[in-house]
Image (cartoon, helix red, strand yellow):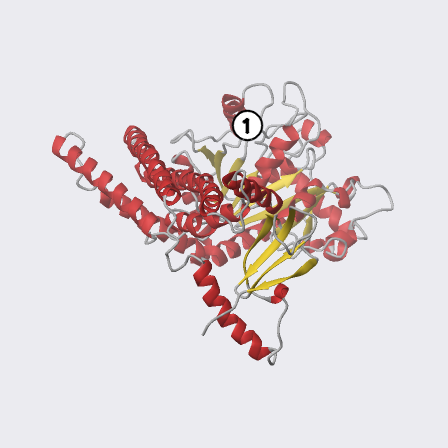
Amino acid sequence: MGNREMEELIPLVNRLQDAFSALGQTCLLELPQIAVVGGQSAGKSSVLENFVGRDFLPRGSGIVTRRPLVLQLVTSKAEYAEFLHCKGKKFTDFDEVRHEIEAETDRVTGMNKGISSIPINLRVYSPHVLNLTLIDLPGITKVPVGDQPPDIEYQIREMIMQFITRENCLILAVTPANTDLANSDALKLAKEVDPQGLRTIGVITKLDLMDEGTDARDVLENKLLPLRRGYVGVVNRSQKDIDGKKDIKAAMLAERKFFLSHPAYRHIADRMGTPHLQKVLNQQLTNHIRDTLPNFRNKLQGQLLSIEHEVEAYKNFKPEDPTRKTKALLQMVQQFAVDFEKRIEGSGDQVDTLELSGGAKINRIFHERFPFEIVKMEFNEKELRREISYAIKNIHGIRTGLFTPDMAFEAIVKKQIVKLKGPSLKSVDLVMQELINTVKKCTKKLANFPRLCEETERIVANHIREREGKTKDQVLLLIDIQVSYINTNHEDFIGFANAQQRSSQVHKKTTIGNQGTNLPPSRQIVIRKGWLTISNIGIMKGGSKGYWFVLTAESLSWYKDDEVPVKGILTRERTN
């Protein structure tokens, strides 16, 4: 890229900046720029005025800069200034420029020292400046003044962070030399967003006001707190000089003399001062624009294609034609239906990589959440045993029995099946909520038509809620069907016959595995076990008692409790 083309880079970005400001919004594109950051009375305004060679910035106590000032310096034969909000008006008197900045600031922020993030765009044409664009931000403050809100420090910090967090923004950190550099507000903020110091340019002001015997040599030589782009020292006019209307040209000559005569700075005098700082910033910004231009161009082309695609969709749209309105309405409703189906079927144009949604989330509800809710159901084995015991005894009544009656089995099983209603209904609620969320996401494309968006969302959501009631009725009906009849002949049902057959197969394998040894009842396959009251049997002594019985395919064993066996085992004979 030639020198001529390089010189055109900054004016090109200036035109883009003006275009975005004229639209009344900040573009999603991050323009290459330099943000000036510093505390109150750090000397930011003096540095900018030295660049221009004119007094044009408001001055005073407290917060003077209350809106970001986008200062565009353009090399020109004539000297004048223009505001973006005063198109066509040229300011040749820079006192009028100051008054216009103050008036425009008060117009947005009021007279109470409040702040606003809406920038003021000022372009200065002069033969004494280099092409450069700077954004002067409000000075960092700690204490509210006048009618300022108590959180003024937080507001200013947030405004500054909006600019300096952008990767395309260089940071001009202005710090006075007569304060501790380690406590510099500007460098502290810059380090938060640029910890490696790659985007930060340090400016040390008020070198002439340092205590006698001290200097900032280590800082300016980039030894104390090193920055990739280094430091530049400047000497501004004092308040006394400003009040006395000292000429800026004379002040810059005095600055030059200071660096040449000071023993700590004379060896680096050619790298100090306002003229050198302006050259450094011009070169740094030009190189920065050149480096970021390819990525910037790609983003700009991407947005352009997106806008062209959106314009194409409305190319043949005529608001005054009723047929066009009807057709457009049908197209948007059909597109909504297509988007909804794609989100459920999982073939959407844009794949969400941050979270599950639509059909994927519904799938998860059925295959993960529903089984989890079933497993999570409280199951008290002791309570279940007690219910089984009561069921058996209540069915037998005054009589005693040996085996579990079918009625007791059905009563217990039906009670467990009914517990499935809770997780099932909860799953229906989760699916319904996800469907409604999907509807809201699909209606975002209708945001340009708020009434259509609202009505579409309402109608579809109401339909989903109507189907919710019928779905729940169907789910409850299915559970009631399972409760009403238990098919004990089903192949998956483990009844006595199936258990005996399985037990025989396992017993054969176990016998081979144990080399023909007989396993005790506790090692055999259990068909049923539970508490059983046995009475009037000759082999039992002591009358009617409750015993724990274990029924296997080979034997019936009984115990005084569920661990210790008692008198013996009744073995059933098998016939081949």
Looking at the image, which residue sits at the far front? 538
Looking at the image, which residue sits at the far right? 213
Quarter of the figure with the C terminus: bottom left
Q: Amino acid at mark 1?
A: Arg
Quarter of the figure with the N terminus: bottom left
Is residue 234 among what the camera can see? Answer: no
- Residue 441 position, x and y percent, is 37, 40
- Residue 528 position, x and y percent, is 54, 56
Q: Residue at x 63, y 23 (%)?
A: 149
Give the total number of marks visible in the rendering.
1
- For the residue pair 1 and 407, the one nearer the viewer reads as 407
Residue 210 vs 287, above or below: the answer is above
Looking at the image, which residue sits at the far bottom? 515
Location of residue 164 by image quarter = top right
- For the residue pair 386 and 305, the one nearer the viewer reads as 386
Residue 399 vs 111, above or below: the answer is below
Q: Label 1, secondary structure: give it.
A: helix
Is residue 496 among what the camera can see? Answer: yes
Q: Which residue is mark 1?
A: 98
Q: Residue at x 64, y 32 (%)?
A: 154
- Residue 250 position, x and y percent, is 66, 39
- For the residue pair 296 and 232, the one nearer the viewer reads as 296
Tag 1: Cα neighbours inside 10 Å, few (<14), some, or many (≥20)?
some
- Residue 373 position, x and y percent, is 50, 45
